[in-house]
Amino acid sequence: MDMDMDKKDNPLRLKDIETGESMTVLSEEKRKSLLRDMQKFYTVTVDYLRKKRPLTQNVVKYAQCLHPEVRDQNTAMRYVRSQAEEMPDITPNKVAIICDEWKVYRVEEIENSVMYDNDDKLKIVDHFWKEVLSRKSASGNQQFPTLQKLVNSSLPSGQPNIAATLY
């Protein structure tokens, strides 16, 4: 994606930034200062992500494979391979291992409690992957260590175990 973050019109205007109720008790000056800090944080974050993890349309398209309900679809395996190939920190050798681990993941029994919350709503994808990636093999080792590299590279937070604590 090619976006000029320095362009004055690109960042969301302060009055359009949605915040929680706790901001209403602050003085106008303090609130604006915090909003400017938030705006700067997002600008710096986006700029960092653009440089370190360049997003192409393909990366966004292929990331669909990480949706919990997509793993059995015919396109999932192809998208996993393509997503892994798009990631600069995943070597060609690791792509093959990721595909092998994906095949195991595909046949792995995933309980409804891992995919859905108590209201039968799909869990946040970070929560789902945190549970899946914490699984151990029969020998006690992490079951999907290389697939985790793809998940970490593809999720917005980059680390599902950290992102899960943010919700």
Image (cartoon, rainbow, N blue to C red):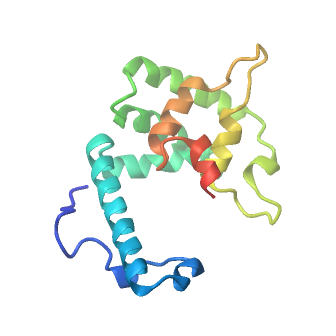
Locate residue 91, reporting x and y percent: 38, 22
Residue lying at 45% horizontally and 85% vertically, measured from the top left: 27
Locate residue 74, reporting x and y percent: 56, 43
Residue lying at 64% horizontally and 42% vertically, measured from the top left: 129
Q: Is residue 3 visible?
A: yes
Seen from the viewer's position, the closer of residues 161 and 146 is 161
Locate residue 88, reporting x and y percent: 33, 32
- Residue 161 falls left or right of residue 33: right
Residue lying at 66% horizontally and 27% vertically, measured from the top left: 104
Q: Is residue 143 above or below residue 106?
A: above
Residue lying at the far top of the rendered structure = 139
- Residue 55 falls left or right of residue 109: left
Q: Is residue 55 visible?
A: no
Seen from the viewer's position, the closer of residues 53 and 19 is 19
Looking at the rendered image, the quarter that the C terminus falls into is bottom right
Looking at the rendered image, the quarter that the N terminus falls into is bottom left
Question: Residue 160 sits in which quadrant?
Answer: top right
Seen from the viewer's position, the closer of residues 23 and 109 is 23
Locate residue 52, reporting x and y percent: 30, 41
Q: Is residue 38 above or below residue 95?
A: below
- Residue 41 falls left or right of residue 8: right
Q: Is residue 146 above or below residue 111?
A: above
Seen from the viewer's position, the closer of residues 66 and 132 is 132
Residue lying at 30% horizontally and 55% vertically, measured from the top left: 44
- Residue 47 falls left or right of residue 42: left
* Image label count: 0
